[in-house]
Image: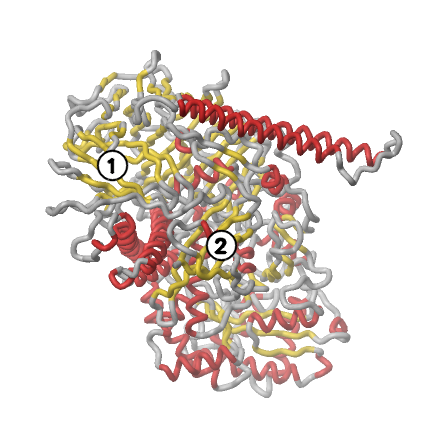
């Protein structure tokens, strides 16, 4: 009774505060000093001000109404749980469904109105070039353009340069793929090391020579194998500007399928390596080969303090349009940026390729004659049948005139009289003869041109940054500033076509098994980084650092580099040779196993009640792994916990920065099990059979599903005991529909099981929020009805097949060239369906020949219960030139618009363009895609990057896997025939708009809701269940670990807490704390999130964030920590703007 009184008083107090705050808001509106009273005669402007005030007041009232309803919910929840036993059992309701009583903890959701303003946008000027609008307006007509086939004839007058000389920078470069046709190591041994060795000697022969390099992964491997003398020479070449390392990432990453965690991580790994070894921070970005460009990359480069960048693979029609309008150089700005804080200067190469025939000017037949590797007698020649000629006294005038004509024509496409001419190709300059041929012949041409003032040209070798510096100087601005008259652009450059209707949209899905493994590794790396940094800080504070395995840092470093390597634009893309894919896979698995060891060692230390008892023994780890993989191309197999007379403990790791309530499923060898909390309280669990197929169970293996609340970034502890059937162990009931298939079904006495021949009528599973209907014939999703609504929402799943063309050009690893619209998937026999129902989850499994679909609904309050968990196990290894697609039909009026994320960092609106072929309307989907109208939004969250589209109103469509028998003529020389059994995992979230708005307006930005952000995090970072290894001796006391003293605001994501390397590559005491403040849409319903969640206008007190640790040192830095942004201060309060990523050098002690 006493508690009930306290609850009532507490609720009343909160209510009073809310009412008082409403009064203050009213007061603020009434006493607005900006409003002068005019004796009742209001000018028009004053009336509009008054209207705005009234609207604001209505909004404030609505927001307060929301807050008050949340308070009432919380008070009701508190009073409902103020009495009764500690663990309330789920019970069956009259209609046969399960009811789970609410937890004895209120959840409270409060977002301040200021934090909602950001997503409403509307600030600042619109950029002149918005890519969505450009694509809608362009005809994409592919008219024959003369020698520049995809462009137009370029003319000029010789007097165009009378006032200002043409300044030409020829940039020698070699594009080295860290794996494609050969493995990384084979490329290094056979080509790359020779390129770099020749570079050192050849650049030293003449100070006028230059060379550009990008891939630090190769450079670091070479560095480890060269002498101190050669290292000193390289440092000199970098110091005097002859050698430039551009971008400075571990690789030149793919920008379609990569996640922003991995993009940042490979950038940090490269930049930190360069700082330690060369002392040379990169200034310019160089991305000649990724197959389309994301606007996330310019943001990351700008935040890493780069001022300029270059791109090449952009749709040929866009290149032509930009060339015609002198827009090939622009300031690239983020869509949410109201001013110019995210601007970076970008150069788009105008022609077909980055090779020599397509870089000196518009005519490849002429430019090829100036690629001196192709001199007669060599291994490669010019396809245009006119070979290069060595430059001599006799021919230099003619040859120079021919080349200058190309330079001048190319220059006419740009706004300045400074011209960039790249000189290189894949794995170029691997022999000394090529260095000599290019450098000697070009120097003769330059000397001739520069000695003729009447030509008004100055030509020289240069680096990329020398080109940009000269351009800034000519246009009279500081490096990185906007030159007068240059356009501002926002948006991205997907999807890419290099000719005709050859759209590079197949690689958004190619080899999905490895796209999925990439994300598993990423989640483990983030978890391992955070847990390792915390464990080492706590060990250091306790004086036990000497006993902690600091050797784990070497495993972390290797895993960072493996994940970085796999972001390469022929790795995560699925566009490498089969043997190279195996090499990547072996590396990914090796690092995954290493990271599980790092997590186990950190969890072991942090979970011990008495840290003095800690001892590291690599031979006998304290914890077992949660799962294991037999090989790099096998799916994981979960660890089965063997129960006997002594209790077994399990440590649960929650990698999220928010507390979470989740169902954790463990595998045990007996159905008679009792699960206790850390305090010894019995917990209710759902126990189920463990199925190996539609109708067969795995003998002696059972699933125990336990709902548990886990601390943010922390560790929980469970105890398992063998037990006779107790009231807390609740069995799942199962129905199997055979649909005419003659199969016998495994039975186990402990579980209710009904076998039926067929289910012609539709059926449903439900939880506290929704009822989900499935087709009795197909077992696939049909509709969703929220419990507080009468009307069902159509959400119908269909499976489809795309074929490929019969003509010479067919789909392959890169290209998607379908023969027609998709056709329905027609199974040879009807599916076997299995419906499981229980207190904490219910699921529907449909078994088809080429895929198994499992849709699970969690019966939990909060994030887990508000979306549908969907898994598709896909096996198309017998397909010939087919692609399997999933299509979701809804009654949402999406009006030709859909939304896809870019790198999990931001959302980009898309328009379905009828004028383009079907394949052009597909886009990358690394983490989510959604469609919406004024009332609803349906989001498909994904745990792996796949290609997505919306080909008709109310539809979302995803390509699940593709098997293609031929090469698509882009250099790979293979089809896609090494398909694996792949598990594609999704969450489907249907949200209701509370603030009805015209969602299809002209706004170029859109944001997920906070619930949507969290749903994505739950999907991508599942809790890890680590069983304590069986030991003979008594188990030490284990305590849950709560690293955060206060919760992070719910719009903050802790992207990483990454221990930094010291000069000798051992771990230093410093870590990089990387925080992302997410943009979010408040206009979607946000009740029942199931945890305490508030926002804080971007403010965070780091000093009081970490439990048991002090912030000893804190300094804001650039993204990759090369530049301090402010001096270290005593204050540990920080501020991050919406959508921004803040990096801090942090020392905990």
Residue 291 got which mark? 2
Q: Is residue 664 above or below residue 434?
A: above
Secondary element type, mark 2: loop
Question: Residue 543 in the image: x percent, y percent?
Answer: 30, 61
- Name which residue lies at 32% across and 27% down: 840
Q: Is residue 69 above or below residue 238?
A: above
Residue 666 got which mark? 1
Q: Left or right: where does residue 109 sit relative to residue 1057?
A: right
- Name which residue lies at 37% across and 59% down: 560
- Name which residue lies at 55% across and 68% down: 283
Lower sequence index among marks 1 and 2: 2
* Observer able to see residue 192: yes
Judge depth for marks 1 and 2 and give the one in front: 1
Q: Quadrant of the rendered structure where residue 392 is? A: bottom right
Question: Residue 180 in the image: x percent, y percent?
Answer: 38, 60
Residue 347 got which mark? none
- Name which residue lies at 21% across and 28% down: 689
Number of numbered discs on residues: 2
Q: Is residue 856 above or below residue 926?
A: above
The residues bearing labels 1 and 2 have C-alpha atoms spaced at a distance of: 42 Å
Quadrant of the frame with the C terminus: bottom left
User: Of 935 and 55, which appears nearest the observer?
Assistant: 55
Q: Left or right: where does residue 268 sit relative to residue 583?
A: right
User: Of 755 and 108, which appears nearest the observer?
Assistant: 108
User: Of 930 and 996, which appears nearest the observer?
Assistant: 996
């Amino acid at each position: 009774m006493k508690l009930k009184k306290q609850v009532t008083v507490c609720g009343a107090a909160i209510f009073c505060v809310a009412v008082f705050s409403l009064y203050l808001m009213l007061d603020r509106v009434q006493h607005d000093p900006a409003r002068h009273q005019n004796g009742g005669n209001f000018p028009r402007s004053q009336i509009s001000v008054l209207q705005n005030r009234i609207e604001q007041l209505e909004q404030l009232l609505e927001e307060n109404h929301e807050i008050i309803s949340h308070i009432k919910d919380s008070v009701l929840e508190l009073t409902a749980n103020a009495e009764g036993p500690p663990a309330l059992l789920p019970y069956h309701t009259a209609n046969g469904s399960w009811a789970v009583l609410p937890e004895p903890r209120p959840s409270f959701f409060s977002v301040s109105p200021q934090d909602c303003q950001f997503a409403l946008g509307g600030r600042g000027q619109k950029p002149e070039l918005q890519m969505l609008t450009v694509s809608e307006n362009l005809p994409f007509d592919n008219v024959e353009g003369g020698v520049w086939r995809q462009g137009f004839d370029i003319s000029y007058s010789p007097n165009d340069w009378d006032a200002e000389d043409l300044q030409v920078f020829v940039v020698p470069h070699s594009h080295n793929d860290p794996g494609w046709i050969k493995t990384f190591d084979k490329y290094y041994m056979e080509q790359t090391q020779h390129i770099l060795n020749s570079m050192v000697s050849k650049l030293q022969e003449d100070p006028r020579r230059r060379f550009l390099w990008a891939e630090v992964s190769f450079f670091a491997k070479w560095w480890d194998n060269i002498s101190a003398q050669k290292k000193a020479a390289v440092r000199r070449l970098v110091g005097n500007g002859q050698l430039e390392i551009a971008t400075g990432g571990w690789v030149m990453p793919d920008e379609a399928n990569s996640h922003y965690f991995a993009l940042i991580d490979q950038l940090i790994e490269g930049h930190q390596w360069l700082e330690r070894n060369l002392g040379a921070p990169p200034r310019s970005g160089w991305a000649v080969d990724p197959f389309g460009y994301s606007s996330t990359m310019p943001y990351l480069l700008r935040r890493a303090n780069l001022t300029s960048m270059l791109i090449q693979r952009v749709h040929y029609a866009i290149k032509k349009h930009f060339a015609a309008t002198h827009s090939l150089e622009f300031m690239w700005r983020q869509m949410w940026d109201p001013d110019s804080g995210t601007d970076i200067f970008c150069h788009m190469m105008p022609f077909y390729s980055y090779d020599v025939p397509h870089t000196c000017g518009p005519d490849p037949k002429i430019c090829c004659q100036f690629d001196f590797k192709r001199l007669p007698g060599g291994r490669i020649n010019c396809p245009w049948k006119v070979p290069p000629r060595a430059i001599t006294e006799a021919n230099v005038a003619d040859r120079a005139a021919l080349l200058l004509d190309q330079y001048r024509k190319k220059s006419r496409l740009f706004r300045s009289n400074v011209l960039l001419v790249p000189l290189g190709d894949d794995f170029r300059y691997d022999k000394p003869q090529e260095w000599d041929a290019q450098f000697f012949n070009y120097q003769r041409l330059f000397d001739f041109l520069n000695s003729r003032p009447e030509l008004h040209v100055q030509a020289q070798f240069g680096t990329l940054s020398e080109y940009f510096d000269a351009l800034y100087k000519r246009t009279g601005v500081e490096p990185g500033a906007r030159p007068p008259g240059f356009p501002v652009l926002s948006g991205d450059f997907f999807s890419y076509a290099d000719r005709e209707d050859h759209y590079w949209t197949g690689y958004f899905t190619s080899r999905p098994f490895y796209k999925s493994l990439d994300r598993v590794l990423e989640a483990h790396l983030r978890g391992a980084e955070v847990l390792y940094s915390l464990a080492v800080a706590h060990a250091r504070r306790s004086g036990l650092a000497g006993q902690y395995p600091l050797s784990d840092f070497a495993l972390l470093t290797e895993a960072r580099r493996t994940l970085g390597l796999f972001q390469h634009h022929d790795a995560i893309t699925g566009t490498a040779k089969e043997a190279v894919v195996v090499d990547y896979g072996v590396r990914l698995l090796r690092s995954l196993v290493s990271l599980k060891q790092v997590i186990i060692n950190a969890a072991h230390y942090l979970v011990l009640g008495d840290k003095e008892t800690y001892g590291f023994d690599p031979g006998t780890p304290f914890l077992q792994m949660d799962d294991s993989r037999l090989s790099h191309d096998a799916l994981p197999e979960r660890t089965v916990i063997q129960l006997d007379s002594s209790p077994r403990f399990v440590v649960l790791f929650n990698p999220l920065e928010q507390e979470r309530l989740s169902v954790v499923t463990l595998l045990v060898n007996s159905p008679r099990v009792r699960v206790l909390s850390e305090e010894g309280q019995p917990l209710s669990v759902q126990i189920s059979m463990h199925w190996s197929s539609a109708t067969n169970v795995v003998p002696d293996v059972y699933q125990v599903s336990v709902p548990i609340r886990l601390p943010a970034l922390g560790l929980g502890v469970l105890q398992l005991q063998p037990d006779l059937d107790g009231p807390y162990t609740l069995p799942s009931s199962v129905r199997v529909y055979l649909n005419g298939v003659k199969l016998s079904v495994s039975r186990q006495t402990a579980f209710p099981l009904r076998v039926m021949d067929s289910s012609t009528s539709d059926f449903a599973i439900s939880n506290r929020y929704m009822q989900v209907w499935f087709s009795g014939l197909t077992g696939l999703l049909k509709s969703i009805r929220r419990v507080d609504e009468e009307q069902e929402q159509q959400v119908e799943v269909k499976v489809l097949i795309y074929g490929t063309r019969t003509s010479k050009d067919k789909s392959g690893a890169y290209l998607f060239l379908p023969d027609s619209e998709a056709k329905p998937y027609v199974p040879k026999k009807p599916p076997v369906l299995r419906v499981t129902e229980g207190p904490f989850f219910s699921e529907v499994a449909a078994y088809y020949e080429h895929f198994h679909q499992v849709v699970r609904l969690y019966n939990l309050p909060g994030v887990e219960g508000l979306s549908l968990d969907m898994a598709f196990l896909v096996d198309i290894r017998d397909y010939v030139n087919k692609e399997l697609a999933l299509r979701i039909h809804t009654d949402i009026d999406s009006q030709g618009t859909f939304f896809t994320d870019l790198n999990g960092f931001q959302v980009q609106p898309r328009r379905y363009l009828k004028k383009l072929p079907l394949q052009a309307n597909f886009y990358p989907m690394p983490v989510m895609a959604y469609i919406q109208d004024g009332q609803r939004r349906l989001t498909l969250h994904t745990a792996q990057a796949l290609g997505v589209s919306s080909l008709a109103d109310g539809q979302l469509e995803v390509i699940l896997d593709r098997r293609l028998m031929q090469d698509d003529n882009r250099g790979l020389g293979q089809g896609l025939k090494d398909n694996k059994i792949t598990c594609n995992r999704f969450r489907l979230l249907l949200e209701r708009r509370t603030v009805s708005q015209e969602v299809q307006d002209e706004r170029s930005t859109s944001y997920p809701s906070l619930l949507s952000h969290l749903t994505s995090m739950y999907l991508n970072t599942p809790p890890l269940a680590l069983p304590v290894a069986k030991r003979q001796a008594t188990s030490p006391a284990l305590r849950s670990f709560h690293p955060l003293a206060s919760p992070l605001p719910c719009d903050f994501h802790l992207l990483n807490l990454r221990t930094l390397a010291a000069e000798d590559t051992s771990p230093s005491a410093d870590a990089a704390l990387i925080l992302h403040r997410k943009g979010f849409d408040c206009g979607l319903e946000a009740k029942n999130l199931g945890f305490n969640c508030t926002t804080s206008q971007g403010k965070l007190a780091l000093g009081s964030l970490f439990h048991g640790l002090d912030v000893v040192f804190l300094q804001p830095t650039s993204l990759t920590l090369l530049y301090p942004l402010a001096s270290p201060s005593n204050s540990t309060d920080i501020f991050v703007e919406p959508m921004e990523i803040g990096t801090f050098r942090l020392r905990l002690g």
